[in-house]
Image (spheres, helix red, strand yellow):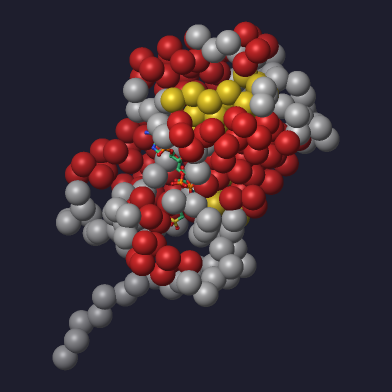
Amino acid sequence: MTSPPGTTFVTGASTGFGAAIARRFAADGRRVVVSARRTGLLAGLVKEFAPSVLALELDVRDREAVAQAVSTLPAGFADIDILVNNAGLAKGLEPAQRADLDDWEQMIDTNCKGLVYCTRAILPGMVALGRGHVINIGSVAGSYPYPGGNAYGATKAFVHQFSLNLRSDVHGSGVRITCIEPGLSGGTEFSLVRFEGDQRRASAVYAGVEALSPDDIAEAVHWATALPAHVNVNTIELMPVAQSFAPFQVSRETG
Ligand code: NDP
Ligand code: 8X3
C-alpha cells in the first residue's frame, strides 16, 4: 500500500488542503512539487522536507506559465505520476442576480480553466509512462445546490464531469483519475477568501462544528493513490458527521 516512486505535483499548496496533501506525500518520502501564487507560504514545506520538495510560483490561470513550468521542471522532479489539482476558490455568496461577475470569472478561470491547463500539461507524461494518477478536488457544492452557490457549485460540477470524462479518454493507459468531493472543511483560508478577508464572517461558518480538516482530505487523497494499481476510485464524497441535507425550499402564497 505504499506510493510508487515518482513526483507528486500539487497545485494550491500554500495553505489548506494543498499544504496538507503535499505534506502527506512528502512524509512518505516522495518528491513533491508544491505550487501556488504565494511562494513565501511554501518555504516551510521546502525547508522541512529538503531536498524532496520543490516550490514553484504558479498562477494556474496562466495557460502559458503552466505549460512552461511543467516543461522546464528539473530532472529530479519531472517524472510526475501524481497530479493533485487542488487550487481553487469560492468568491462571494450573493444570489446570482446580485453576484459580482468578476468573482464568477475568477472562479471559472481558476477552478475550471486552471485545472484543465494543469491536466493537459501533465497528463501526456503519465500516459506515456503507462501509469499515473490525477486527483481533482471537487466539492459537494458540485452535486447539491445551495443559495449563493451559483457559479462556485457549477465549477465543481465541471470538475466532477471532467474527471469522469478523463477516465474515458485514458482508458487502457493505466492512468487513474479520482475526484475528491469534500463538504464543510475548516483549517483553510476557503471562507476567508470567499468573504474577502472578513475574519468574523469566515469564523462563523465553522462555529460549534467539528468540520473536516485538511488532514482528513489529505488522507482520502493518499488512500486513493495507495490502493493497488488495478483499482480506480472514481469519486469520493465526504462530509463531517455534523453536516447533512436540508429540505427543499418552498415559496408559499400568503394571505
Ligand atoms: P485555501 O484557500 O486554504 O486554499 C486554496 C489554495 O488555492 C491556496 O493554496 C491558493 O494559493 C490556491 N490558489 C487560489 N487561486 C490560485 C491560482 N489562481 N493559482 C494557483 N493557486 C491558486 O482553501 P482550501 O484548502 O479549503 O481549498 C482547496 C480546494 O478545496 C479548492 O479547490 C476548494 O474549492 C476545495 N474545497 C474546499 C472546501 C472547504 O470547505 N474548505 C470543501 C470542498 C472543496 P495562493 O493564494 O498562494 O495562490
Ligand atoms: C466548499 C464546500 O459547502 O462551502 O466547496 O460549498 S461548500
Q: Which one is in front, 237 or 125?
A: 125
Q: Residue visible at 29% across and 38% down?
A: 106
Determine if residue 206 is in view: yes
Give residue 252's position: percent from left, percent from top.
25, 80
Q: Which one is in front, 155 or 55?
A: 55
Residue 38 in the figure: left or right of residue 228: left
Tell me: residue 134, above or below residue 64. Answer: below
Q: Residue visible at 36% across and 50% down?
A: 193
Give residue 176's position: percent from left, percent from top.
65, 28
Locate the N terminus and report the quarter of the image it occupies. Answer: top right
Q: Which one is in front, 125 or 216?
A: 216
Locate the C terminus and report the quarter of the image it occupies. Answer: bottom left
- In the picture as drawn, the residue positioned furthest to the bottom comes out as 255
- In the picture as drawn, the residue positioned furthest to the front comes out as 47
Determine if residue 234 is in view: no
Give residue 120's position: percent from left, percent from top.
47, 19
Residue 194 in the figure: left or right of residue 48: left
Q: Quadrant of residue 37?
A: top left
Q: Residue visible at 58% across and 23% down?
A: 54
Give residue 178's position: percent from left, percent from top.
61, 36
Q: Quadrant of residue 198?
A: bottom left
- In the picture as drawn, the residue positioned furthest to the right comes out as 1
* Ligand 2 placement by image quarter: bottom left
